[in-house]
Amino acid sequence: MNINITQSGQGLLSVDINGKPSDWKISNRNGVWNLYQPRGYGCLLLSENLAKIIHKPEQLAKKVGELIHDCEK
C-alpha cells in the first residue's frame, strides 16, 4: 500500500492510497492529530495521537498505512 499525505486545510490532512484519493483524513484538535474516516452520520476515529510524527512524512505515511491496514482487516 502506497500512502501519500497532503495538506487539505488548516489542521486537516488528506490521505491518498496507491495514487488515488481516499476518505481517510488526519485532523488536529487541540494539538492531537488523529486519523479518521467519515461514515454516514458519524466517523471512525482512531485514538492514536500522531503528533510525534506529524512532521516526519516517511514515518507518518508508514504509520498511517499500518493503521488503515489494521482497521480494514
Image (cartoon, helix red, strand yellow):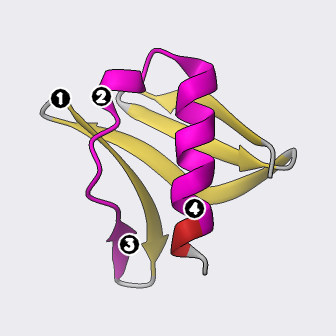
- The span from disc 4 to disc 2 (Cα, nearest Å) is 17 Å
In primary-sequence order, the first of circles 1 and 3 is: 1
Q: Residue furthest left?
A: 30
| Horizontal and vertical percent position of residue 31 | 17, 29
Q: Residue at x 26, y 58 (%)?
A: 47
The span picked out in magenta is 42-69
In primary-sequence order, the first of circles 1 and 4 is: 1
Q: Tell me if 49 is positioned left or right of 67 in this view.
A: left
Against 49, residue 7 (above or below) is: above
Against 4, residue 65 (above or below) is: below
**Circle 1 crowding by C-alpha within 10 Å: few under 14, some 14–19, many from 20:** few
SS of the residue at dot 1? loop
Q: Which residue is mark 4?
A: 68
Q: Residue furthest right?
A: 19
Q: Which residue is mark 3?
A: 44
Q: Which residue is mark 2?
A: 51
- The span from disc 1 to disc 2 (Cα, nearest Å) is 7 Å
- Look at the image and say whether residue 22 sits in the magenta stretch: no
Q: Are marks 1 and 2 in contact (CB under 8 Å)?
A: yes
SS of the residue at dot 4? helix
Could you tell me the amino acid type at mark 4? Ile
SS of the residue at dot 3? strand
Q: Are marks 4 and 2 in contact (CB under 8 Å)?
A: no
